[in-house]
Image (cartoon, rainbow, N blue to C red):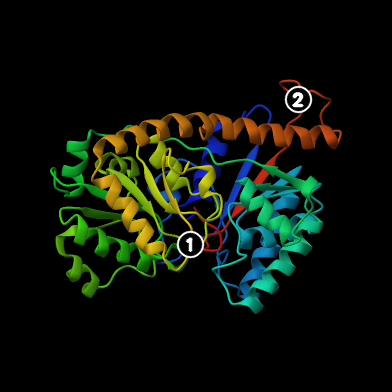
Amino acid sequence: MNIGGPAVQVSALLRGMDSGRFEHRLIAGFVAPDEADHLDHRAPDLPVQRIKGLGRAVRPSDDARCLAELVTTMRRFRPHIVHTHTAKAGALGRTAAVLAGVPSRVHTFHGHLLHGYFPPTKTRIVVGAERRLAAFTDRLVAVGGRVRDDLIAAGIGKPGQYTVVPPGTRLGPAPDGVKAREALGLPQDCPVVAYVGRVTGIKRPDRLLGVAREVHRAVPEAHFAVCGDGDLRPGPETVAELGDRLHLLGWRPDVETVYAAADLVLLTSDNEGMPVSLIEAGLAGLPVVATDVGSVSEVVRDGVTGFLAAPTPGVTAELTSRTVALLRDPDLRREMGARAREFTGRRFGEERLVADTEALYSAIAVARGWWSPPAPPGSAVPPVLSVIPSEKGEHS
């Protein structure tokens, strides 16, 4: 449950789904030292069963113990459905479900590992494992159409297994821009570009800093606020180079304050699923400049709610020029931001996520004969077990 898209989605489902029809239990591992725990920062009220060793690293002895504990938990709880999120939990959770005799297995791809994470040999191993896992999974959920299409093209599952369920989220009440900048130590009279997310390889913090340097040359008064942390946090030399124009905010539970203080949001990743940070930016009424990877184009409408740049060798220059154009044109920022708020609010709300997932579970219940179609209120409850470790394999 490290801060990111999967944790946001599961939290919304646990809070929003009809408890009279669905009974949940959440199992998660512990986050890595360089990451922040969503449950600690943003959802301390959610009940969770922690399993020691359930994390991103592959350690045969730990994984065997986790698998045994998952099987024991499932046999005790006797869920009708096991729904896993992220790669490592998808492997352990679905395997445990088969061993425990759970009738239905669902897995959500919040992104994929098909490129940008591993060398070719390891990627082939990952793809082979996902193909085998898909063979004993009833439903595969993708957060976006492009993510689904990439997975199908890689031979992972069959088209009929897939359902596209985009993320859904909401922002807490935000302070006004003046108070937000005061809280974050940002100047009132300068444009601010925000980045929200993990600071790790696939997110290309080096590209983010490259854009910051070039933007600073064109718009010297621009400031960059980085909300997040990770294994590639900028070092002292980089911080010194950008001086007081770079603000490392670390992880913050009040992410809405960061958006309230910003003029636009920047994303520089090599690979994404459907980034929740860009949905949040839209809900906050901010335009986005981002690399066109994964299902980013299903969140950001190029030229309408922001600008997208193909991940080519010249992408840093294009991201820079688009960022500079927005910083120099406040009217365009406001227009794009207003369109972004309308679009994301309509398509990516929590209520829609909950309704889509309830419909998925209900369809499984009907197909399995647990419910009669349509599922009436007050029917027998099919329990759902969500399994999420902390790992970098899938993100937002």
Count of labels shown? 2
Q: Position of residue 66 (x, y in %)?
A: 64, 64
The answer to whether residue 48 is visible is: yes
For the residue marked with disc 1, what is the amino acid? Pro
Q: Position of residue 242 (x, y in %)?
A: 19, 65
- The circle on residue 379 is 2
For the residue marked with disc 2, what is the amino acid? Ser
Task: In the displayed orientation, state which residue is furthest to the top.
Answer: 377
Dot 1, how many residues are within 10 Å of its Cα: few (below 14), some (14-19), or many (20+)? some
Nearest the camera: 161 or 222?
222
Nearest the camera: 383 or 7?
7
The answer to whether residue 251 is visible is: no
Is 243 displayed left or right of 361 in the figure?
left
Please determine whether, in this image, residue 247 is positioned above or below residue 330: below
- The circle on residue 259 is none
Name the residue: 47% across, 32% down: 343
Nearest the camera: 362 or 246?
246
Residue picked out by circle 1? 311
| Secondary structure type for disc 2 | loop
